[in-house]
Image: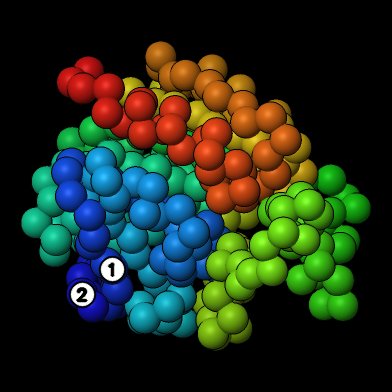
Amino acid sequence: MSHAQAADGAALHYEVRGSGAPLVLLAGQSNNHRWWEAVRERFEAAFTTVVMDWRGTGASDAPDTDTYSTPNFARDVVAVLDHAGIARAHVYGTSMGGRVAQWLAADHAERVDRLVLGCTSPGAPHGIERGPAVRKALADPATVHATLLDLMYTPAYVAAHPGPFHTLGDPAMPAHARRRHLRASARHDAWDALPRIIAPTLVVHGSDDDFNPTANAPLIADRVPGARLQIVPGGRHAYFEECADRATPPVVDFLKGGPR
């Protein structure tokens, strides 16, 4: 177990595994590094994978301070890279991790080689928000678990895979950290930063994502210079897990694309 130190002194847990060029895998809101557990091995034959627990999750510190924002999460990623001795890495961020990856690529361009933005959004001011019915179901403690499960996976996948599912939130998160994660994701707005991204970029999204509507993908792809767009048919928010057989190989091929 390794810990980097953030600028404010918070300890940030991370793990390094695999071989090859470094690849940072960034998890979704209120989730720890186990978000990637079901698919991480698929990347390790080609890359040295780096996963981390966001502040407030897993084995990282959870300060009850105003340090939870997507730009600051990006600075936390830089702190992890510094501690691991990694000057430059590929980055694959999904959901809120994709929001953080946008800032990482825009504000710390020298640290990012190739970039994959999965099931993410440019932010509420310019992005497409989830519908009112979804928001209502997520706000109800009686339905939130079943709603999240349905937004992440198809019923057929859930029936065939009894779990555990590691994309439904870190159950050990303190309440203050959960609130701050929600606020950080809700306040994300990288619209003006996206044209500054110089890393070769692939935007990936499931075609049936109602949690973070699929319409956000072309918005981002049109905004990032030279970005490519890939829609995964039938994929919901956790397309990278349920549709791994179809979604992972194109991502690996893109990341192995050589010098820009």
Residue at horizontal 36 percent and vertical 26 percent from the top: 254
Find disc 1 in the rendering and name its residue: 14
Residue at horizontal 36 percent and vertical 34 percent from the top: 252
Residue at horizontal 53 percent and vertical 81 percent from the top: 173
Find disc 2 in the rendering and name its residue: 2
Q: Is residue 234 left or right of residue 42?
A: right
Q: Quadrant of the N terminus?
A: bottom left
Residue 70 visible to an observer of this rendering: no
Give the quarter of the image for residue 83.
bottom left
| The one of 211 and 222 positioned closer to us in this rendering | 211
Is 36 situated above or below 222?
Answer: below
Mark 2 and mark 1: Cα distance apart in space: 6 Å
Residue lying at the far top in this picture: please name it. Answer: 226
Residue 228 horizontal/vertical position (percent): 47, 19
Q: Is residue 142 left or right of residue 111?
A: right
Q: Please name the amino acid that badge 1 sits on.
A: Tyr
